[in-house]
Image (tube, rainbow, N blue to C red):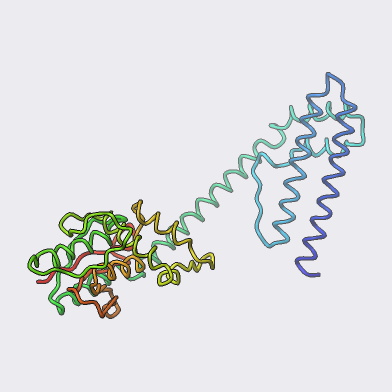
Amino acid sequence: MSTETAQEELLARHRKERKDLTNQITSLKKQASKKTRKQVNAKCTDLEQELDTRHKSELAKLNGVAFEHSDSEEITPAQLLAQLSLDQDPVQSVCKTDELQQREPELQGKKRRNRQKERLAKRDAEVARIKQQAMEEAAEQPNLKDIEQNSLDKVCVVLNLKQFDIQPDGHCLFNSILDQLRLRHQTNNDIEYDYNFPEEYTGTKYVSEMDVYSLRSLSSSFIRENRDDFIPYLFDENTMTVKDLDEYTKTMETTAQWGGEVEILALSKVFNSTISILMSGRSTYRINEDAKNPELKIVYYKHSYTLGEHYNSLHDL
């Protein structure tokens, strides 16, 4: 018998048992008097909990999963005898339940405490084992942060560049590019650069007056005006759908959302500049290599910062 068939049969039996118990509980409640109604209701609740626990245990066993219910779900002698007395007079059954509940601490209190201690000891031992295993595995793992930083440092020496720290937040890409614009474009005051400002952009057109939101607006406006060129970059592999371009650019323009390749490409077109991205373990990635204006240089980190991916600016030595 397949696991799927066995599970269907088990669930069918559970439904029947649930229906039968509901009928028994209804009958008990109808026969209860005012004096016994409270005890009968409590007994019915206990029976429902016992059935739920047994069903969960059977499902877990079928699926090969260990199941351990709490003390509050254990079947006491009082509950067990009460269940066996379902066909008896409800008042008589409740009286037996009350009597056994009074003796319950004497019958099983000590045993329950021992079981709980055993469970706690077993749990603590398992937690200690997992912690020790995690520590041993962590000690064997390479330090990716150091590996990445050492690799970038060596490449920067060869290229006569130094890494200029940018605050690590959602604006780091835009701040890095803004720093490059001020470093490589703004200082050449005698040169008039040919920029491609989007028609819908209404902000300042002077680099000296721009901030991160100027660059966010420029990139988002350029993407909207050239949507056919950027839609392929908005494919979401997790949902297998294309992100809504207008919603994407609105979020990018008005929040501190991290920027990436889409925004780098857009800004390289706006400022008519090649943007090169230095990365560990890979050759320098250049976007818009045919651009006419001075190249903008940034560096990408994957492992070096707590918040995750990060961009810094690159200055010449």
Asked which quadrant contains residue 29, the reply is top right
Q: Residue furthest top?
A: 35
**Image quadrant containing the C terminus:** bottom left
The one of 38 and 7 positioned closer to us in this rendering: 7
Asked which quadrant contains residue 20, the reply is top right
Q: Residue furthest front?
A: 199
Q: Residue at x 44, y 63 (%)?
A: 133
Total marks drawn?
0
**Image quadrant containing the N terminus:** bottom right
**Residue 315 in the figure: left or right of residue 199:** left
**Residue 133 in the figure: left or right of residue 17:** left
Q: Residue at x 75, y 49 (%)?
A: 54
Where's residue 55, x and y in %?
A: 75, 50
Where's residue 37, x and y in %?
A: 82, 24
Q: Residue at x 20, y 65 (%)?
A: 313
**Residue 94 in the figure: left or right of residue 278:** right
Where's residue 290, x and y in %?
A: 25, 80
**Residue 268 in the figure: left or right of residue 249:** left
Where's residue 287, x and y in %?
A: 29, 75
Q: Residue at x 57, y 44 (%)?
A: 117
Q: Residue furthest left?
A: 190
The one of 50 and 231 positioned closer to us in this rendering: 231
Q: Is residue 143 above or below residue 36?
A: below
